[in-house]
Amino acid sequence: MIEQRHFDEAERILSGGFAQHSEAFHEGQRYALAWCLAGKPKATPERNRETACPYESGTAERDAWQSGWASGHATAVQARIVKAPGVLHELPLPQGGHVLVTEPELGVYAWEIADEEGETLREAGGYPFAAAALRDALEEALGHG
């Protein structure tokens, strides 16, 4: 359930960028970020993205709200509040940085090891044989190799 504290945190994260867009855009942005901060609660017929938008279908305000929602979700992905689509696992590394495992195509995996600035240090992908390369890279990154 999305609570007021999620909206308050979303407001804090988004503070400073309100001059460029309409109020409807910012409402959608704030709602999406609050939804992500709340753990992306499952939609119900009574409460979902469509019912959350206070604007009538076919209006510029509704379009702006929906566009703001997409921006808020993208902000949550960028801030690592939620995983990007296709991300299977994200493992923080003790020395900083992370390991990211994705499935961009069915049955094909990709992975990357990045430092604390997000700079890719090692990456590969392919079919299950890529797991051995990932294991070796993780051992090296964690100092076990």
Image (cartoon, rainbow, N blue to C red):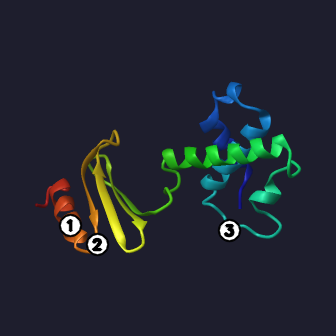
The residue labelled by disc 3 is 42
Element under label 3? loop
- Amino acid at pointer 1: Arg
Residue 88: assigned label: none
Whole-angstrom CA distance, mark 2 to mark 3, is 32 Å
- Amino acid at pointer 3: Lys
Query: Residue drawn at (74%, 58%), measured in percent from left and top?
Result: 49
- Amino acid at pointer 2: Tyr
Where in the figure is residue 120, as x and y percent of width and height?
28, 46
The vertical placement of 41 against 81, above or below, is below
Query: Residue drawn at (19%, 59%), measured in percent from left and top?
Result: 137
Of the image marks 2 and 1, the number of the one nearer the N terminus: 2
Element under label 2? loop
The residue labelled by disc 1 is 135
Within-10-Å neighbours for mark 2: few <14, some 14–19, many 20+: few
Where in the figure is residue 130, as x and y percent of width and height?
24, 68
The residue labelled by disc 2 is 127
Q: Nearer the viewer, residue 66 or 17?
A: 66
